[in-house]
Image: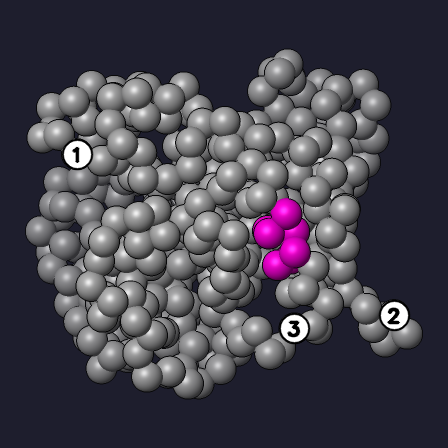
Amino acid sequence: MAAPAYPDELPRIAAEFPAGPVMYTGGLENHIEIIEKLSRARPLLGNHPNAVKQVRDPCFVQEVACKNGCTYPRTLFSSSEVPRDGSFLRKPTASVGGIGVVPWKNPCEETVDGREYWQQFVSGIPMSASLLVTGEKVELLGVCRQLVGRKWCYTNHFRFCGAIQLSTSAFQKDVLHHLHHFAIDLARKVGLAGLIGIDFILPRTSKQRREQSPVVLEVNPRPTATMELLERCTGRSQAGMHLASLGVPLLRESIALQDGSKMYWGKAVLFANETLTVSASVEQHLVKCSSCLQGRESGWPMVTDLPCSGTVIRPGHPVVSVFGVAESPRLVLRMLRINISKVMQGL
């Protein structure tokens, strides 16, 4: 689908396909009117517009988060009260992957009333939790450390550029306990179902203050970009679990947990630092990297989201997703940087 056609043309394009259900993923939660149109025409295998609207409301999320032992950044909806010392971030209400998030410093910056808000910057480690909601049950599937604004991915500021899978045993019990209860309460209040993600900050605490409280940033009411790491590690089909939780009959083998891997997975999104025209040789280089980078023995491709020959990628836009696998999260980070460097050599 061409970029200008997204998302307004989605209902028309969907109507051209045979009758059947529809499932949405990243970014469409910012366009509730499109989800409404799709849900009127087809069975919706995902969270319905009313639920999406509620979990995208910062005031509502703050109320539920604080009730369940989490915290939430101070949030303002008018620039008149916002300090201009960089301690607050300006965020678009319809943003995904950190696009458009900037420190609020310049008093001459233009605002777009009703389509942005200001949130206090919280120092700490950006994280994401993946959960599966089935009826009254909420299962924590895993937690990842997010990679944000990494220069070696050729992006900056608060742009999401990947994630690294972590072991839940590395967290204080209170952190995951609070997140889990927040998700349970949220699901019960708005009727969530299927795969959801919670973005949060894990604050850095002093040795004297051992207890940590996760700082909830936002709720993604659909499958997220980090969930494929869990699938690579466990063998459980994330799409299969999502569909099964919504009543689609599937073979149990398709969503069963395979032999637990002791390896950790990570991915990094490589962005274009200048205009890139994908030639036939560039396409061949990317295909070769996908099958030759270290970690290919797992059977998973190590480079995905491959652009076709002839594609023109503008600066600041994603080129490919690059994966790494190793015995620890620290080694995964190192592997990602090595793999990104190898991909860059042929661009």
Residue 288 visible here: yes
Between the C-alphas of marks 1 and 2, the distance is: 53 Å
| First-in-chain label (1 vs 2) | 1
Q: Secondary structure at mark 2?
A: loop
Q: Amino acid at mark 2?
A: Arg
Q: Please say if the residues under marks 1 and 3 sit with CB atoms less than 8 Å apart.
A: no
Quadrant, the N terminus? top left
Q: Amino acid at mark 1?
A: Gly
Q: Tell me where residue 344 appears, x and y as whole percent.
A: 31, 61
Q: Tell me where residue 126 appears, x and y as whole percent.
A: 61, 57
Q: Nearer the viewer, mark 1 or mark 3?
A: 1
- Relative vertical location of residue 232 with respect to residue 152 in this rendering, above or below: below
Which residue is located at x 31 percent, y 34 percent? 44
Quadrant, the C terminus? bottom left
> What span is in magenta?
179-185
Residue 181 drawn in magenta: yes
In the picture of the structure, the residue carrying the numbered disc 1 is 20
Quarter location, residue 145:
bottom right
Q: Amino acid at mark 3?
A: Phe
Q: Nearer the viewer, residue 292 or 72?
A: 72
- Relative vertical location of residue 313 with respect to residue 59 in this rendering, above or below: below
Residue 64 drawn in magenta: no
Question: Which mark, residue 143?
Answer: none
Between the C-alphas of marks 1 and 3, the distance is: 42 Å
- Relative vertical location of residue 198 with respect to residue 141 in this rendering, above or below: above
| First-in-chain label (2 vs 3) | 3
Q: Tell me where residue 325 appears, x and y as whole percent.
A: 37, 77
In the picture of the structure, the residue carrying the numbered disc 2 is 209
In the picture of the structure, the residue carrying the numbered disc 3 is 171
